[in-house]
Image: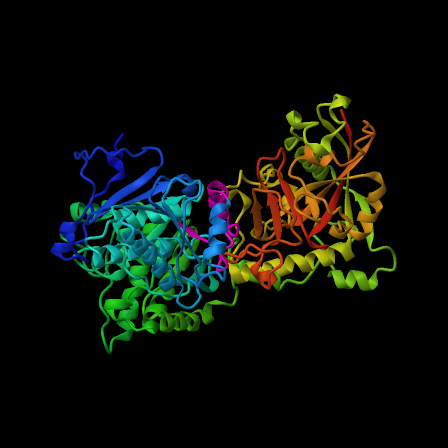
Amino acid sequence: MKIPRECYFLFELKHTMSETEQSTFSSCDEDSDDGEEESSVDTECSNDYKNVRILVRQGALETEEVDVIVNSTSERLTLKSGRGSRALLQAAGNEIQTECSQKYPTGLSRGDVAVTGPGNLKCKIVCHGSLLKYGSKDAKKVHMHFISKCLEELNSRKHTSVALPGLTTGFLMFPKRVAAKNACRAVAQFIDANPDSSLREVRFVLHPEDKETLQAFREVVQTWDISIDTDIERKDLCRFRINEISILVKVGKVEEEKVDMIVNSVDKTLNLNKGSLSNGIATAAGQQIKDECQQNHPSGVTEGNIVVTSSGSLPCKKICHACVPGYKPNKDNESKKNIQNIVIKCLETSDENQCKSVALPVLGSGFKRHPPECASAGMLKGIEQFATSHPQSPVKQVVIVIYGDQHVEISKAFLDEAVAYQGAPAEPARWTQEYCRQQYHKDLRPPEYWTEFTSGKSIKQWKTECDESYHKLVDVDSTTQEAVEKLVQSTWQRQKVGHGRDAAGLSSLNYSGLKVLKVQRLENIDLYENYSHFRARLFHKAGDIGVFEQLGKISQSTGDIATTKNLNDDNVLKTELYPEINEHFLFHGTKDDTQKKIFSQGLDFRMAGEKGMFGQGVYLAESSTKADQYTDCKRGRTKDEKKMFLVRSCLGKIHLAKLARAFHKPPCFQSGCDSDSCEHSDFQRCDSVVGDGSWIFREFVTYHHYQTYPEYLITYVRV
């Protein structure tokens, strides 16, 4: 079966390519038939560059039938390091590890290539290499150099096809689009330099669940946009409010913003290919908006006015194209007024289209030559005037995005101009590094819903003034009782009762569920203080390296955590729960003789057995069925009253384990390391392990004494 025609795209690259280059780059002809078969299921898109076909596929790299497979691993060539490399090793067999050890006993340098046979893989050779983390010196250069060397190896052996993974989009933390552009640029440069090479096909093979990487590679291959991005650090600069509108000023790309309306800066001809900003937006949005501009506004747009189009492929509702008048030297106030007026027009258009959020580039910068101070003052004054005259507007958030060669000077101008508006700074948005940094600096207090040790005092004040026990077990209110009971029932898996080595003896009891009798809350300010300190460390870490990936979004995960998935947004158990650092409620079954120890000491991994599937740690469960297995002895199962805890747990950065392995602590997430005994700091290693393989239940394991807080004690019977 041929690749379906909708996977192929015709590109207009006249603004970046010569006529000779244009003649060598073409989309696949829908009427051609070369006899080759491709799957219509796993092929995302395809294009031809000169005489080489470039494909983006979703699937597993280790199953590809090509001449060369490319693998990213550690400098030491320890192939079990890294999920992709480990999967490749498992499919190929240990002989490729043996060959690596024999041929490259000291490993290899970053960017170099180690070549082995295929083992059990359906290829002829495997090219192994180790790359650098994004932000490291020469990380992009090493990435491209490695791909080039792999293609040189292919060519020297007269092979024709190669399959590559994302290479740098996982632990190496490259932005997805940067990784895709780098890879395609390296391929294009090799083809240009080797017109007579044997290379005929390049496959980028990406995991189906890694949707962001798939989308990035698909867009780059579709548009063949391999231009070099200006290398700037994306970051939030400041937040503040103007009346009812929250303002965020940041460094980044406006086309990457997830808002209702994106504003574009254009010239009078409405030629979206003119200007790096407009070209970037048009490239991301697709040909559709170019066609709309030409068809609906053939005469262009006058200075000081706007036109509106659909959003194309961008994740917004509309694009507002604004034509800013040029800067008038010696008429600074008039130039500011021009920018102010066009900002108002953009926001009024957002208001008319019922848009709640708008992203604007820095209007007037670039070829319009407005000084940074003029642009910043005009834009903020325009927002202020709109906010004052439209108090009931649905527009509640405005993002100003700074990008380009002048970003340092423009950033300073906006920071200076924003001072006058920052009397009442807005709360940072959830799921941002800025939010995590703010949480790190907060004073430690008991939760607002505690009744014995209330949040009116800090934990230190309570501990100083308390002359009784630091912990109390209190009955919860009916709302909390109902919420906990619902969580027990919604995560109960009747079909799994009695299954697994830890469930021995349960089948004979002939029960189908649990009946919750009582829910109590443990208020222990000493334990909670230690837990809060650990949680603050994770906020600091997330503020530094980015909000942690949720379990359901990790490649090869079987989904989100069941306990959290079963909590509605208004659920009382979501109060003061922070998914940004992977804080979740999980179950922990316990026997009668250990309850009092947990009340005073918490869940201590040092007291756990050393024969756990993932080493000595605190084992938690997302299913009440799993926790129920540990509430009595295997040889003495009864239907008497039992206890389990609902535990507040900070999982932090999660390591997903598909195979059992006795960890001493969570492994390193630096590319190619994956060790639990390396020299890397806690900021460079994961914080928990989730066993998500072919087991009956997933395993959630923490390895720090204060990583969990046993907040709710559940008394129940089997029925």
Does residue 109 appear left or right of residue 665 in this picture?
left
* The N terminus lies in quadrant: top left
**Frontmost residue, 373 versus 232:** 232
Does 705 sit above or below residue 3?
below
Where in the figure is residue 504, as x and y percent of width and height?
74, 29
Q: State which quadrant residue 464 falls in.
A: bottom right
- Of all residues, the one furthest to the right in this rendering is 468
**Frontmost residue, 544 versus 424:** 544
Does residue 187 appear left or right of residue 125 in this picture?
left
**Frontmost residue, 356 versus 461:** 461
Does residue 629 appear left or right of residue 571 in this picture?
right
The verdict on residue 402 being magenta is: no
Where in the figure is residue 127, as x and y percent of width and height?
39, 52
Q: Does the rendering let one see residue 308?
A: no
- Of all residues, the one furthest to the bottom in this rendering is 330
Where in the figure is residue 35, as x and y percent of width and height?
22, 32
Picture mark count: 0
Residue under the point 61% across and 58% down: 538
The colour scheme used to paint the residues is rainbow
Residue under the point 80% across and 48% down: 598
* The C terminus lies in quadrant: top right
Magenta stretch? Answer: 70-93
Q: Does the rendering let one see residue 550?
A: yes
Where in the figure is residue 356, as x and y percent of width and height?
41, 49
- Of all residues, the one furthest to the front in this rendering is 102
- Of all residues, the one furthest to the left in this rendering is 19
Does 179 sit above or below residue 202?
below
**Frontmost residue, 478 versus 680:** 680
